[in-house]
Amino acid sequence: MLLERARRRRATAPADPPDTKGLALKDAPGLRGMDHPNTFRDAFKSLGFDPDEQAALMGAHTFGKITAIGCSGQFKGIQKGPFCNKEEQLDPPIAPSQLVGNGCTPKLGKIGKCWKVGKCSKKQERKGKCSKKGERTLNPAFFYKNKRAVRPVSDHFGGGAFWDRTPTTFDNDYFKLFHQEDFEAKNNCCGSFGYVRQYKGCMGKGAMVDRKGKKIGGPCDHSWCRKDGGHKEVMMSTKAWAEPDHQFINRASAWGPTRKLIRLPGDWALLGDNETRKAVLDFAKDQDLFFTKFKQAFGKVLDRGHSLALCSAKSPSTMAPKTMPPAAPATTPAPPPSSDPSVPEAVKVLTKKVDGLESKADAWTYYAEGCGASPYLASMKGSFDQCATYCLSLPACFGFQQNNQNCYLDDDADQKISGRVTTPTSKEVALAASWHCAIKRQA
Ligand code: HEM
């Protein structure tokens, strides 16, 4: 059995990072490269983005989430690792009234912000859920329900992660959370330092040490710590957390609605260059400045002069040219954002620039039926055009299905979308059906 497990582990060891030369976004170092912030600056620079614009674009991570099982790198188990167990030191801090022991009661599907004090068991220690048997634990509590079981008080962090304390809002909280951090905190491991798969890295369990093996205290002594996996390196928060509207999360009642915060290498790299670091600080102080720079930078992304619908990971030859044409002067005022409060802020920002793209005749193929399957890349409320706009902005989005105002965006993993639709139809016919599907037309 053990041998079998070891074999399986070896069999899943990741391949060497691919040669990134020639990729438009040079995205291969995206989930590694924590020690090489210049690779990110170089990539953004070669695309024509100055340091402020790079920081502003990365600030898009203020919105959204990392899914536990994602198309980009299997983030399953990313939440495991140490977390501070002192209520007053958490960010936001936990008040006594938020403790289950003091009467806080989690409710199904409702933001409760309840936490539970416990004691680390041997099994939890072994699984890396807490650091030492008998130690006091403090975990977010929620009403657990899946098809087989109901537990009114379950307590653990949900799988996956958010980037800031307000993941449903496009704001500058992303910057506020790490402008004061030292880039070198990347050397603080969440656990011990040793072999992670075939190379040395930071583990998620064991006593916290630096990358030279020196003890560095516990999670309450830091705000972020590093975890390395076979093909990804991340910084996880040790004090900051978020519990957004449960509707925002796939199966919140089964996977847990409260999550730790994360920084990918491309996020942390902003601290490793003097100019991007200054931008992080400026945006943390001034949200309007962030919005202005984001609009400018995202405008450049969209003005690259190619149909986003033609982007396909499967056909790199269709990718955009690597050099950026000069940005068009911003003379045309953007249309006003939708005032519908159910539309995510990020979509409103995106919609300003990409309105009209959806209507391009060659952008979409329509079906008068549903498509896709859970887990989705994202779900949102919005009009067909707003969902199409958002899907076009996400390179991994292959298409989406819509019913009323609910849209489910998806990649095409295992042909879960393309394998389900049958007969293409006109946009009018598709939109008249209660469930309809739109797929980005490939070149
Ligand atoms: C170094 C560059 C970047 C890397 C490596 C990166 C990586 C990622 C990863 C791994 C996810 C999680 C996907 C999932 O689990 O489903 C993600 C989500 C996201 N990224 Fe990035 N990203 C980068 C830059 C950007 C930029 C420039 C933007 C926009 C201007 C952006 C916007 C987003 C958004 C909105 C989400 C959330 C999606 C959701 O909630 O479904 N990212 N990114």
Image: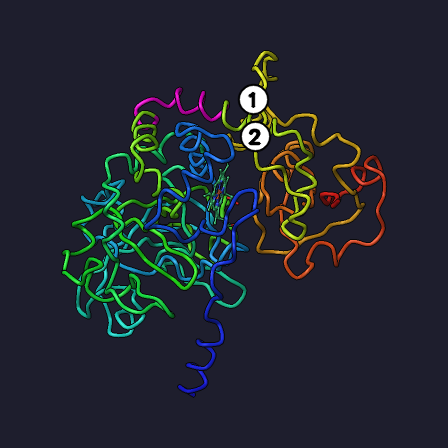
In the rendered structure, which amino acid carries the disc numbered 1?
Ala
Q: Which residue is drawn at 45% across and 51% down?
A: 29
**Residue 371 appears left or right of 36:** right
**Residue 211 in picture, x, y percent from top left:** 22, 59
Left or right: where 417 falls relative to 150: right
State how far apart marks 1 and 2 are (Cα). Answer: 8 Å
Q: Give the range drawn in magenta.
A: 283-295
Q: Nearest the camera: 198 or 62?
A: 198
Residue 327 % position (x, y): 56, 22
Q: Position of residue 86 (x, y in %)?
A: 18, 50
Mark 1 sits on what residue?
327
The quadrant where residue 306 appears: top right
- Residue 289 lies in the magenta stretch: yes
Question: Label 2 crowding class (10 Å Cα cut-off): few <14, some 14-19, many 20+?
Answer: some
Say what secondary structure mark 2 lies in: loop
Q: Is residue 435 visible?
A: no
Residue at point 23%, 46% (across, down): 184
Is the magenta region chiefly helix, strand or loop? helix
Tag 1–tag 2 contact (CB < 8 Å): yes
The residue where tag 2 is placed is: 324
